[in-house]
Amino acid sequence: MGDNPLAAEIRVSDLQFGYKTPLFDRLNAHIGAPGVYGLFGRNGTGKSTLLKLLCGLLTPEAGAISVLGYTPRQRAAEFLAQVYLLPEEFHLPNLKPEALMRNQGVFYPAFDAALFREYLADLQVPHDQRFSQMSLGQKKKATIAFALATRTPVLLMDEPTNGLDIESRMQFKELMLRPEHATRIVLISTHQAHDLESIIRHIWFIDGGALRLSSDMQRLADDLAMGVAASADELPDQDALLYTEPLGTQIAWLARRDALAADFPATPLQLELIYKALSLNPQQMLAVAGERD
Ligand SMILES: Nc1ncnc2c1ncn2[C@@H]1O[C@H](COP(=O)(O)OP(=O)(O)OP(=O)(O)O)[C@@H](O)[C@H]1O
């Protein structure tokens, strides 16, 4: 057993890891409460690698990882029963969903068969077809339904909405908001920021081998303002602007809130704009919204 098993916590301390070349250089990260956390970063920054390290599929070169009080790489049976990784690329045995549940659901003590069936129905996955007869999107949705039905306290999802159509993406969001997931730590890697907008509580942004931003959405809302200007004349002052992009004939903008007038109205957060700004103007964005403590 870990020192403090089932503490709803993930802690990464001074993590070093690389394949042939270094990837993470003293990466530190912490999650101390249940909720949906978005893991963002450009291609190749190590999001999938971090998820694999968190569930013990890879071994840190140095530093420490603690998940629910366990050291993932030890792969203790009771740890593996509490953590589920939905990988980006997956292989399914040629079974029907019910058989998958009978074969693999047993590894997860809190697996809920009724919920699995419900999620499959919500996502319109044909329950009486073998996976070899399903489309890629249908298979992906079956794996999402399975991952959600495990009810593990920690759920790691790598690009779960990739390959899903618009309706399925909306259904995914609805499923994530269901109360049975409220007690889980759900860490989702994605480039589809818009898919997470309404469900996410906190964002992580990794770049250059470290976690550059770890912020709850409220703090981002305090630090940043965003909107759409009809023309360049209507944009906030240049020294407040952190990012702009054309939006038809208009201009979407993101600015530092402290450089705007004190009575500037609160603006809804647009995660996609924040992610673009972080990716394309990381230096200035992180100076405003990056780590402070
Ligand atoms: N098995 C492996 N062997 C060698 N290098 C690898 C391996 N897996 C990943 N890498 C490299 O490690 C880096 C991080 O890969 P990773 O898949 O974690 O990135 P990512 O942030 O998930 O990327 P993406 O957004 O493209 O999915 C990349 O440069 C990749 O080429």
Image (cartoon, rainbow, N blue to C red):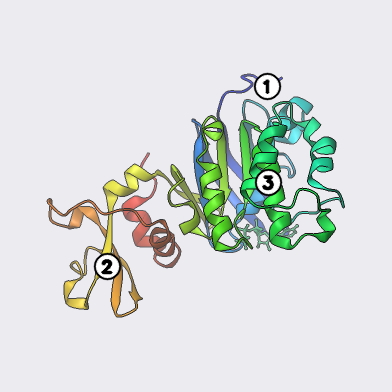
Q: Residues within 10 Å of mark 2 (few under 14, many from 20)?
A: some
Quick check: 92 left or right of 200? right
Quick check: 139 left or right of 103? left
Residue at 34% x, 75% y is 247
Q: Is mark 2 on a helix, strand or loop?
A: strand
Where residue 215 appears, as percent x and y from the top left, is: 40, 44
In the image, which is nearer the foreground, mark 3 or mark 1?
3
In the image, which is nearer the foreground, mark 2 or mark 1?
2
Type of the residue with mark 1: Gly
Disc sitting over residue 285 in the figure: none
Residue at 83% x, 48% y is 96
Which residue, as the protein is rendered here, is positioned at the far right? 94
Type of the residue with mark 3: Leu
* Residues under numbered marks 2 and 3 in contact, where contact means CB atoms less than 8 Å apart: no
Residue indicated by mark 3: 120
Lower sequence index among marks 2 and 3 = 3
Lower sequence index among marks 2 and 1 = 1
Up the image or down, 261 lies above or below 67; here it is below
Q: Nearer the viewer, residue 99 or 124?
A: 124
Look at the image and tell me whether residue 51 can be seen. Answer: no
Q: How much space separates mark 2 and mark 1, taking CA atoms?
A: 50 Å
Quadrant of res 44: bottom right
In the image, which is nearer the foreground, mark 2 or mark 3?
3
Residue indicated by mark 1: 2
Where residue 278 appears, as percent x and y from the top left, is: 42, 60
Where residue 50 appears, as percent x and y from the top left, is: 63, 48
Lower sequence index among marks 3 and 1 = 1
Q: What element carries label 1?
A: loop
Disc sitting over residue 228 in the figure: 2
Q: How crowded is mark 1: few (under 14 residues within 10 Å), some or many (20 or more)?
A: some
Where residue 41 appears, as percent x and y from the top left, is: 52, 58
